[in-house]
Amino acid sequence: MKKMKKIVAMALSLTMAVSMLTACGGGSKETKAETKAESAAQTTAESASEKAAEGETLKVALCVTGAVNDMGWCQSAYDGLKLLEEKYGAEIAYTENIQAADMVAAFTDYAANGYDIVIGHGFQFGDPALEVGAQYPDTKFICVEADVSSDNVASYVMKCEEGGYIEGILAAHMTKSNKIGFIGPIEGASLIKIMNGFEDGAKSVNPDIEVQTAWTGSFTDTALAKEAAQAMIDGGVDFIAHDANECGNGAIAAAQEAGIYATGDSYDQHELAPETVLTSSMYNVPVLIEAAYNDIANGEFKGEVKYLGMAEGVVEMAPYYDMESVIPEDVRKEIAELIEQIKSGEFVVPCDTTAR
């Protein structure tokens, strides 16, 4: 694996300090800034598709908000990055645990260093991509789950609500208390649609079911999700679902300790609690990342918002494993038939991004 790039505020400050000292040594700050911008532009002047056609190695960077070994959202993107390295020989780099305030700096660093493709994994990267993309027109920016686009910025959106809907149906069939819960991280359209999909799926089975929801305000603090889940459990909830990235692992832990069922998100999370997790809504981010890479390498890139779901193999449900025995056969059959209807387009899961 290529050496991981680390972006920290101290490094950015040092770069700025060096630039200022150089400016004092001769020439104006404006002249130095223009020279630096021109130099960066020259290094990326040849398009990624041209480089790919000539057999040159493309440089691809990934930015994520959590850890790349979180067994969930961020790891799914890292798996996609590794696929590009192993299958296409791409030169890769990544930065993990990026806070919102550091996203522009992270994108700028990669673009200035000649990366052909920069991927921001999460809706939060949308506006930073537009800002930095305007300064580096020869770099392609891919934003997963955002809703932005420009000449060199595209959003690839997964129909995650499809998985949430299926989980809701499963929860409604498996609950005994008629109370189920859902834990989210930080509110955003790409996450709200999953929570709403879960509720819609549950209420398609039982309109009177009680669906409790909570937002932790964090993508990584597992203790917060565990605390939120425990509060629901104390109130009678006997099924927990989440879309809270690494933070959601805490919700699964609470369910496991309480002896109730749960579902995973983003990744196959069965191993986190084999006797608790019935299935997981999996996002095949590697498939999405490979599709975006090929769009660019083949000269087919468009600055647009693209939607991919179960029909494209980007969203799917994890196996039940040995938990299949606790799920009634008729429920498994109902879910399997609905998934086929979603894939064929016969049934369309509502995509509601409005907070309820």
Image (tube, rainbow, N blue to C red):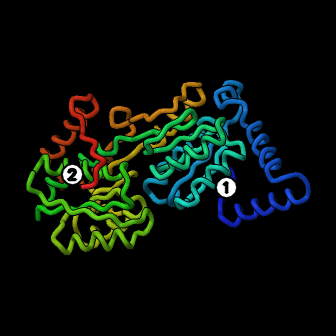
Q: Identity of the amino acid at label 1?
A: Lys
State the residue at coordinates (80%, 57%): 19
Determine the secondary structure under disc 1.
Answer: loop
The residue nearer to you, when weighing 31 against 282, is 31
State the residue position of label 1.
5
Determine the secondary structure under disc 2.
Answer: helix
State the residue at coordinates (9%, 51%): 207
State the residue position of label 2.
168
Rendered image: mark on residue 266: none
Q: Identity of the amino acid at label 2?
A: Gly
- Picture coordinates of residue 231 (x, y %)? 24, 74
Question: Residue 146 lies in what quarter of the image?
Answer: top left
- Picture coordinates of residue 164 (x, y %)? 28, 49
Q: Is residue 227 above or below residue 284?
A: below
Q: Split into 4 quadrants, where in the image is the C terminus?
A: bottom left
- Picture coordinates of residue 338 (x, y %)? 20, 37
Among numbered discs 1 and 2, the one appearing first in the sequence: 1
